Image (tube, grey):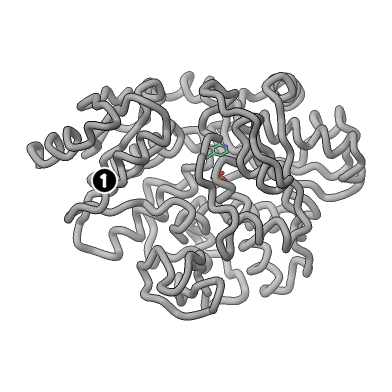
Amino acid sequence: MGEYRVRCVKDGSEQPHFSLSCPNDDSLLRADYKAKRLDLKDFPGIWRFLDWLPVQGIIPEACQGSVTYRSLGLAGVLGLKNLFISFSGYWPEKGARMTTCSFKDLEAPPTVQRLKEKGGSPTLVVASAGNTARAFAQVASQTGQPLVLFVPEKAQKRIWTTVEPGPVKLVAVQGDYYDAITVAEKVQSRPGYVPEGGARNIARRDGMGTVMLDATLKIGRIPDHYFQAVGSGTGGISAWEACLRLNGDGRFGSNLSRLHLAQNVPNAPIYFAWKCREPDACCADMFDDVLFNRRPPFAIPGGVKDALEATKGEVYGITDNDATAAKRLFEQSEEIDILNAPGVAVAALQQAVSLGTVQSDDIILLNITGGGVERVKEDCTLHHLPPDITIEASHWEDAIEFLEAGA
Ligand SMILES: *Cc1c(COP(=O)(O)O)cnc(C)c1O
């Protein structure tokens, strides 16, 4: 279980298990699992895919996974015969129990488990505009993993857990997500701290890849198309990598799901890079700032561009108006509340249908990356995490001083 080598995508060279980068270039690393055939384990949630996760053990408390179902409502409205929805969030009636309500709940548990297996008890550093912070706060609280979160000041209200908060420190940074990352980078290079690694972390990617695994098993074959709203595009890379592994398994077809990645214009660097255009402007307010990423892993070996080229993919630029309408359409036709980000994916699917990019009988997977926040409030108590300190982005020494005083 979980036996693998870690290789650079560019030159195939084997690297130490816990590396985050390649020695010769900026290539991503990828896990090369010993098991070529996916043998499901008798564990809950994502852990049944342990063969293709870079961990040896599981976190039994973090037992959720995405749920795939055949759409009737939205499929009917769009005239699609084989629309499947992967839902990551809280919707117990459908079997979905991610209490922090986004597919970051697929990334945080394998990352924390892997850190535990690495040893040395470091403090994990995470910078996030909301969903990633919630997911890591939850699993850190469940496992006692020390964690420092760097969050833009205006996102701090979104940081909560549904379990008693554990050893989690919250640093609110005045500024945007990029400012929070800049401060986090100063801290994570100090002894005793480790970065979570973002797109470079194979545990995050292979955790997200379980969306494609779960869907393929449910459908019986690799879908023709995969729709997702992206910020960094890591979910797109993960879906591609999962397809490559499923091709190797042989039982589910030999196609690669065509990636249809959606971004919110004008904050859409992947869209502009793919379309070879420069963004006209960058504005602070956007439909969902969890999709904000100024430095996506686009052109690096094994990154988003390679994933799009390999899968003959497409990128969509979605306006706030289209995303708002699409979100409402989804909520009415599927009867669950969703986050703004997946509204952007629904709008991309609508565009693809009207342009004829997808056909009515194609097998389509729509990744609803977050939802059920209203639903979870009915069942769970939300424990809001107040900031332990608020700092100016240029005064990152204040964060270090605070953390070291508390240590
Ligand atoms: C993080 C996030 C995304 C974007 O994910 P990528 O890392 O760019 O693949 C989309 N939707 C939600 C709800 C998210 O939290």
The reply, left or right, for residue 346 in relation to residue 353 is left
Location of ligand 1 given as a quarter of the image: top right
Query: Relative to 48, is 85 above or below?
Result: above
Residue 360, x across and y down, in percent: 92, 42
The reply, left or right, for residue 110 in relation to residue 279 is left
Residue 366, x across and y down, in percent: 72, 42
Q: Secondary structure at mark 1?
A: helix
Pick whichever, 170 or 11, lies toward us.
11
Task: Check disc 1 and give the amino acid type.
Answer: Lys
Q: What crowding class fits label 1: few (fewer than 14 Cα within 10 Å), some (14-19), or many (20 or more)? A: few
Query: Relative to 348, is 222 above or below?
Result: below
Residue 56, x across and y down, in percent: 39, 67
Pick whichever, 164 or 149, lies toward us.
149
Res 72 → quadrant: top right
Q: Please give the name of the residue rendered at 75% of the width and 53% of the height, measured from the top-left corner.
A: 313
Query: Relative to 44, is 399 above or below?
Result: above
Q: Please give the name of the residue rendered at 70% of the width and 48% of the height, measured from the top-left corner.
A: 274
Whether the residue under disc 1 has CB within 8 Å of ligand 1: no
Q: Please give the name of the residue rendered at 46% of the width and 49% of the height, measured from the top-left corner.
A: 107
Residue 69 in view, yes or no: no
Pick whichever, 148 or 381, lies toward us.
148
User: Circle 1 is placed at which residue position?
Assistant: 186
Q: Please give the name of the residue rendered at 73% of the width and 44% of the height, measured from the top-left corner.
A: 315
Residue 155 in view, yes or no: yes
The reply, left or right, for residue 75 in relation to residue 261 is right
Which corner quadrant holds the C terminus?
top left
Res 288 → quadrant: top right
Residue 103, x across and y down, in percent: 53, 42
Q: How many marks are shown on the rendered structure? A: 1
